[in-house]
Image (cartoon, helix red, strand yellow):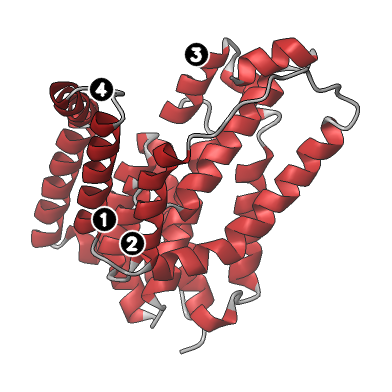
Amino acid sequence: VATGLAQATQVSAGMMTAIVVGGAFFGDNLSFISDTTIAATRTQGCAMRDKFRANIKVALPAALLALACYILLGWNVQSPSTADISIEWMKVFPYLLVLVTALAGIHVMVVLTMGLLATGLIGIGMGYFSFMAWFQAMGSGMTGMGELIIVTLLAGGVLSIIRFNGGIAYIIGKITAHIHSRRGAEFSIAGLVSLANLCTANNTIALIMAGPIAKDIADRFKIDPRRSASLLDIFSCFVQGIIPYGAQMLMAAGLGHVSPIEIMQYLYYPYLLGAGALLAILFNYPRKYTLV
């Protein structure tokens, strides 16, 4: 869609693709069902809606600033003529169901199961696919996540072995040796997940690797679990958005037929998000999650 709009409006394909990538990162930051959200909240021991409330304080201002930048860049762009398109609201119902039930604090497995059932009932009932095609789609989805699941299991096993042999305690000791404040501990959590993301180029794996260590640091320095989960999620997203070899960037570059570097020069959201998160640590914002 972005490539077609770029051709129709004579706008840089890199900028259009960057807008899509930035929006995807923003949505992932605030999603209740993304793998990054689940990894961050489960490792820190907080509810997904609490992490959402902490994240939105930093992510929304960054998104609005990025939106303002894109509006200024596209101020003189002429929009192409479009035909009237009717919205089939029934197709939107499963998304709304997942959002409302997640906000209500229902367990993530129940939320996802309800979303799958609603999708199947509506799709089959309205004739969009058959019963078997529904199962085939779920199978394809699980197959697509297979590699991530295997890597996650391996990462979890390696971390358990390292913890058993005292490696986690050693890492925490080295990281916190010169830290004497909660603010310093928050910076160490941010640096830890950022380094893990640079090495793995996968924000979910980075969260799983850094999460247990971040939890121990948070407990030692009395950092609110909602705050530590938010920092993990934000800084993993920030790094994932500034490396040209990340999966999201490579996928977007392939679909948009542009180079990752061309996308990155217009990808404002991750940079603004990272800057906002650093300022949030420096100024203890939001204070609701920084007061003991």
How far apart in space, not on screen, are marks 3 and 1 (Cα)?
A: 32 Å
Query: Which of the marked residues, 1 or 4, is nearer the chain's N terminus?
Result: 1
Kindly identify the residue that appears in the image at 14 percent across and 63 percent down.
166
Q: Give the label, 3 or 2, closer to the camera.
A: 2
Q: Residues within 10 Å of mark 2 (few under 14, many from 20)?
A: some
Kindly identify the residue that appears in the image at 62 percent across and 21 percent down.
2
Give the residue type that dot 4 points to: Phe
Tell me: residue 125, above or below residue 48: above
How far apart in space, not on screen, are marks 3 and 2 (Cα)?
A: 35 Å
- Find disc 4 in the rendering and name its residue: 129
Kindly identify the residue that appears in the image at 14 percent across and 60 percent down.
163
Query: Which of the marked residues, 3 or 1, is nearer the chain's N terminus?
Result: 1
Give the residue type that dot 3 points to: Gly
- Find disc 2 in the rendering and name its residue: 101
Give the residue type that dot 2 points to: Thr
- Find disc 3 in the rendering and name its residue: 254
Marks 1/2 in contact by CB < 8 Å: the verdict is yes
Left or right: residue 247 versus residue 122 is right
How far apart in space, not on screen, are marks 4 and 2 (Cα)?
A: 25 Å
- Find disc 1 in the rendering and name its residue: 111
